[in-house]
Every structure is written in C-alpha cells, then in structure tokens.
Image (cartoon, grey):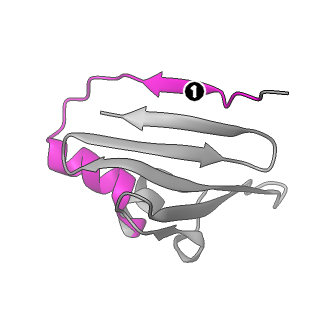
C-alpha cells in the first residue's frame, strides 16, 4: 500500500520587505506577534534544512490547544522556506517562497 502526503503551496504577494516576511516565519517573537493565539513559550524554531519547528495555537475562549510542527526542507534566506506541516490530524508539505 502506497500512501501520499498531501502537498500545497501558498502564494501571496505582500507589500513588505522580504526580510520582514522571513522574520515573521522564522523568529519566535515575530510569529507570536502576528499570530497572537500562539504563546511565545510554545514556539521553537531550528531554521536550517533538516531542522524542526513547533508551536501551539490556543483558542482563547475554550483553552483548546492546536499543536503544529514539522521539519524545514528548503531554507534559502529571504527567498524560499519549504517545510512539512504536521498536526495530529494531518501531515502536509508546505512551501513559502
């Protein structure tokens, strides 16, 4: 039996410098600032090919936690960030470029 991992690509043009977008996806404090449901203490990034990341989003009304994590696959600063995106429900591959 062969299983395939779902893949998707997010494509969005932002009116922001590449450095700012890169930091938003790769620095703990920046992620916590733009994703306020994610407590800073739950965020961990090892931004290198093969490095891992994890964070937990929290529903402020119910306290329910949503755990997310994965592995960085492609890391080209300010150009490309490819990673797996694993939740307890569904593993995915994502590419940010």
Front residue (pair 86, 3): 3
Circle 1 sits on which residue?
7
Front residue (pair 62, 88): 88
| Boundaries of the magenta span | 3-28
Which quadrant would residue 14 be assigned to in this image? top left
Front residue (pair 76, 39): 76
- Would residue 58 be counted in the magenta stretch? no
- Would residue 27 be counted in the magenta stretch? yes
Image position of 63 (left or right of 37): right
Image position of 91 (left or right of 81): right
Image coordinates of residue 51 in percent, x first then y, are 44, 64
Image coordinates of residue 19 in percent, x first then y, are 16, 50
Quadrant where the N terminus is found in the figure: top right
User: In the displayed structure, would residue 20 be above or below residue 42?
Assistant: above
Quadrant where the C terminus is found in the figure: top left
Which quadrant would residue 41 be assigned to in this image? bottom right
Image position of 38 (left or right of 33): right
Q: Which residue corresponds to the image point at 75% horizontal and 39% vertical from the top-left? A: 90
Q: Secondary structure at mark 1?
A: strand
User: In the displayed structure, would residue 42 be above or below residue 7?
Assistant: below
Q: Which residue corresponds to the image point at 27% horizontal and 23% vertical from the top-left? A: 13
Label 1 crowding class (10 Å Cα cut-off): few <14, some 14-19, many 20+?
few
Image coordinates of residue 78 in percent, x first then y, are 18, 46
Q: Which residue corresponds to the image point at 59% horizontal and 45% vertical from the top-left? A: 85
The residue lying furthest to the bottom in this view is 41
The residue lying furthest to the front in this view is 1
């Amino acid at each position: 039996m062969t299983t395939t991992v779902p893949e998707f690509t997010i494509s969005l043009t932002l009116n922001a410098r590449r450095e700012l977008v890169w930091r938003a996806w790769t620095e703990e404090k920046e992620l916590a600032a733009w994703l306020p449901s994610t407590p800073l203490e739950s965020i961990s990034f090892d931004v290198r090919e093969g490095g891992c990341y994890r964070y937990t989003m929290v529903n402020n009304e119910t306290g329910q936690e949503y755990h997310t994590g994965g592995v960085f696959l492609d890391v080209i600063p300010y150009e490309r960030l490819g990673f797996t995106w694993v939740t307890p429900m569904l593993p995915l591959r994502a590419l940010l470029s």
